[in-house]
């Protein structure tokens, strides 16, 4: 395989799903050149071989538990989620209670595919689906009170019983934030006049949470086997809230399957597998001291993709030991940034600060026809902005940022979705997960465990 041939193209495109990885400003900028990529190709091929084996066997050598996320959720796991969503559809409010992998992916699917103002819209404009709020992703007393006050105000305004479904999501069923919030919010909702509260849970059968739901005669959905929290967005864990808010779950999974098929067909060729090339380039940059990973969507709807990617990257690759037991203190440090917002906050640092990071942007090529809300009017005072759409300005800003970074020897790369739709998002999330799996192979660390989060839990438990 000739590295130069594909590097000259500057982009890898998954045509079928409308997803492109643009890497031209990541090679030959800041230290990683074509020769370095060519020298690393055998390692990339080995990483791809390991991923293929994982896909086929469901076994990761470093794990006792199966690792099944690469297979994409089968229909028999989707059906119960959709059936539950159909029953919950008549609710006024769904409160999804969970943290980490039992929250971040759910948030991505709501924000990216329904928009950040979803809950503020009238019910008809939500396609007759309930409001979808998130709780339990913190222990913030004020947030919890505010949420209960919000529901209280809705119940008072409704003039009829308000149906509120609390959906607790937790693999272990014992996570402090989730359990405390579920118990606290359930009691609070039961005390709000005019609220009819119901409890449901998606958890491991037999867990504390599952026992609680049974005791309250609520509905229970099984947490899928072989799925770790941060790999769960395209499984019933992430799909359950997507289904109860009208997201096209079938299209999401179809996009993931298409990405998986493209990755399999690429057979270890980074020129055709964007996940592999992305992993390889970032692995090489990290090896040269650029281990900071700014992930910068140019859209508020996609901010949560960056927050989700933080967990995926940090928990998967941030490890004390490699798979041979050697102390390595490995990892790349993910940093959330949003364009253009953080061009007025972080870009100064990215442009002139330490040469210790890469900047990855995420953009959407086609936002559909501009409206009066997102076009600069043709007025003299607008100068060169006159008549420009916000989408044009947004992309100009992104590309200007990337070019400025290149000018000061700072590598950047870009993910570009043709459109922001369920199929594209499914493909993007699958591709990013595959890239982290590849990086785990390249770094020789176990990407599927998280022993480092146990330390604080032990201290906290002893002090409870
Ligand atoms: O990725 C992980 O495994 C973690 O971040 C978990 O998702 C998080 O700790 C929540 O765990 P649980 O689903 O058991 O409540």
Image (cartoon, helix red, strand yellow):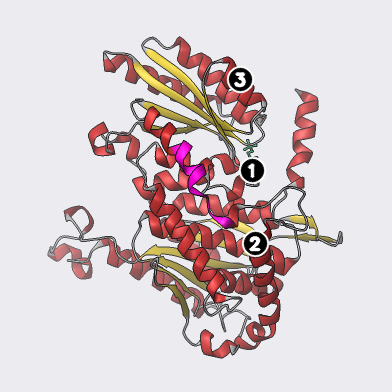
**Residue 47, how many percent across, how many down?**
68, 70
409 up-or-down from 291: above or below: below
Q: How far apart are labels 3 and 1 at the CA level? A: 20 Å
Front-lying residue, 244 or 404: 244
Ligand 1 occupies quarter: top right
Across the whole image, how many numbered discs are drawn on residues? 3
Asked whether residue 76 appears in the rendered view, the answer is yes
182 up-or-down from 333: above or below: above
Q: How far apart are labels 1 and 2 at the CA level? A: 16 Å
Q: Is residue 77 magenta?
A: yes
| Residue at the limit of the structure toward the front, as seen here | 76
Q: Horizontally, is 256 left or right of 317 in the view? A: left
Q: Which residues are magenta?
A: 71-81
Tell us which disc is closer to us: 1 or 2.
2
Q: Which labelled disc corresponds to residue 56?
A: 2
Q: Which labelled disc corresponds to residue 212?
A: 3
């Amino acid at each position: 395989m000739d590295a130069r041939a594909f590097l000259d193209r500057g982009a890898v495109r998954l045509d079928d799903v409308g997803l492109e990885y643009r890497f031209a400003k990541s090679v030959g900028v800041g230290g990683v050149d074509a020769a370095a990529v060519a020298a690393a190709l055998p390692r990339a091929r080995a990483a791809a071989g390991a991923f293929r084996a994982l896909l086929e066997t469901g076994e990761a050598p470093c794990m006792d538990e199966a690792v099944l996320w690469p297979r994409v959720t089968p229909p028999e796991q989707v059906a119960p989620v959709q059936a539950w969503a159909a029953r919950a559809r008549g609710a006024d409010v769904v409160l999804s209670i969970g943290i980490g992998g039992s929250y971040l992916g759910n948030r991505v699917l709501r924000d990216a595919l329904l928009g950040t103002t979803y809950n503020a819209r009238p019910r008809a404009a939500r396609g007759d689906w309930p409001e979808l709020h998130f709780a339990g992703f913190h222990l913030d007393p004020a947030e919890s009170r505010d949420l209960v006050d919000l529901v209280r105000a809705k119940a008072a305004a409704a003039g009829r019983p308000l149906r509120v479904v609390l959906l607790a999501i937790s693999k272990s069923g014992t996570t402090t934030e989730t359990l405390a919030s579920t118990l606290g919010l359930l009691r609070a909702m039961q005390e709000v006049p005019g609220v009819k509260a119901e409890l449901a849970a998606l958890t491991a059968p037999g867990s504390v949470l599952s026992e609680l739901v049974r005791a309250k005669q609520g509905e229970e959905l099984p947490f899928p086997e072989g799925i770790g929290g941060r790999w769960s967005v395209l499984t019933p864990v992430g799909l359950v809230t997507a289904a109860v808010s009208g997201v096209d779950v079938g299209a999401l999974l179809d996009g993931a399957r298409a990405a998986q098929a493209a990755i399999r067909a690429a057979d270890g060729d980074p020129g055709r597998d964007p996940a592999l090339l992305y992993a390889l380039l970032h692995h090489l940059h990290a090896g040269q001291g650029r281990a900071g990973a700014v992930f910068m969507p140019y859209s508020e709807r996609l901010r949560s993709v960056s927050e989700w990617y933080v967990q995926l990257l940090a928990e998967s690759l941030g490890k004390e030991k490699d798979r041979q037991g050697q102390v390595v203190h490995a990892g790349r440090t993910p940093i959330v940034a949003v364009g253009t917002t953080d061009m007025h906050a972080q870009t100064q640092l990215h442009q002139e600060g330490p040469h210790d990071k890469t900047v990855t942007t995420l953009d959407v090529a086609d936002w559909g026809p501009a409206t009066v809300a997102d076009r600069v009017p043709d007025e003299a005072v607008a100068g060169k902005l006159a008549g420009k759409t916000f989408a044009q300005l947004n992309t100009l800003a992104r590309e200007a940022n990337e070019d400025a970074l290149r000018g000061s020897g700072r590598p950047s790369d870009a993910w570009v979705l043709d459109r922001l739709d369920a199929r594209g998002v499914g493909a993007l999330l699958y591709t990013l997960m595959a890239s982290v799996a590849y990086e785990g192979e390249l770094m020789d660390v176990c990407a599927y465990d998280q022993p480092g989060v146990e330390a604080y839990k032990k201290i906290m438990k002893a002090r409870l």
